[in-house]
Image (spheres, helix red, strand yellow):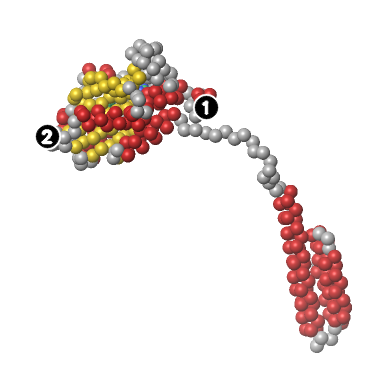
Amino acid sequence: MIEQISGLREDAEKEIRLAQNKSELNAVRVKYLGKAGLLTQVLRGMREVSPEMRPKIGALVNEVRDSLEALFKEEESKFENLEMQQELSKSAIDITEPSKNSQRGALHPLSRVYETLIDTCVGLGFQVVDGPEVELDYYNFEALNVPKNHPARDMQDTFFVSDNILLRSQTSSVQARIMQKLKPPFKIISPGRVYRNDSDSTHSPVFHQLEGLVIDENVSMADLKAMLTALMRKTFGEETQIRFRPSFFPFTEPSVEVDVTCPICHGSGCRICKGTGFMELLGAGIVNPKVLEMGGIDSKKYRGFAFGFGVDRVAMVKDGIGDIRSMFRNDIRFLKQMK
Ligand code: FA5
């Protein structure tokens, strides 16, 4: 019987090595180790073996089975590796094949302007702060020296949510909030969306402002003018024509509005600039002492200046955009032009 088992082992080993693929290998496994396999059949003949020989034969059968199993596994993994290699070589990437034309995105003109303005201001020592778009009437108007029912409210056609809540019409609302929070001296800017019931080529119902506020001792109109000139030159180039015009805001005294040469007609006068040759970009001024006091700041010790850029107008001037609304229509042809 021992010889018979050794013979089976040799035959099985030979057939395992001769198998050409996994299914042939499996057939060999079934032939020798399956339920009705040759090795199993040998065990059935154990009854005729003398009791002293039985443990020996049993141990031999187990050893043969284990060694054949190991051999099966070894061969099987060889076939698996081979299959994987074949699969990989089928899906190999041809790096010499020319690429398809891919579309490259670009920043929206507004994002570009925001980046330039914010970077310049941070370089000038300003801290960036945020404020809510849905705002209390108090911060948008009252704390800025515009009481309820005051005619100055007509300057901004505001969207009210309720009697005391509105969509902020200006980022100046952040001024009052920040005065309550920070101790002077401080320099902040606050970029963000604002809302007004306006719509024409230079007015959009949703637009963007960048508020600036500097509170310190001995702040003057000259500081404001120098700062704004530096900001405008950095944004539009050294040659830019800038015009400061006296104006009125209830929260600044004196107040100015600042214009640059119209980007469409370059100063000769057109429909976009309503024949003036200039486009208005921002309002600014020396903070009204009443506003400082309402914000809890000692107006005898501190003064301040503030400005509020119309960021969309800055983008219009920089990129020569004739209609502010084209920036919000998401027309891919317009966006491609602006790359
Ligand atoms: C204000 O909003 C003041 N808060 C600015 C200010 C800040 C003054 C700090 C003093 C101190 P005004 O309403 O003029 O001001 O708006 C400021 C700028 O926003 C304008 O110069 C213009 O560039 C832009 N702007 C105003 N309305 C619109 C609109 N509907 N669409 C697009 N841009 C607008």
* Local SS, label 1: helix
CA gap between label 1 and label 2 equals 53 Å
Quadrant, the N terminus: bottom right
Residue 329 in the figure: left or right of residue 205:
right
Q: Report the side of 157 relative to 254 (left or right).
A: right
| Residue 166 seen | no
Q: Residue lying furthest left in this view? A: 300
The first of marks 1 and 2 along the sequence is 2
In the displayed structure image, the side of residue 222 where residue 166 appears, left or right: right
Residue underneath mark 1:
336
Q: Which mark is residue 300?
A: 2
Give amino acid for label 1. Answer: Lys
Towards the viewer: 172 or 94:
94
Q: Position of residue 207 (x, y in %)?
A: 37, 25
How far across and down, in percent of the image, does residue 115 sit? 39, 35
Q: Which of the pair 189/74 is nearer the observer?
A: 189
Q: Of discs 1 and 2, which sits in the foreground?
A: 1
Name the residue furthest front.
Answer: 239
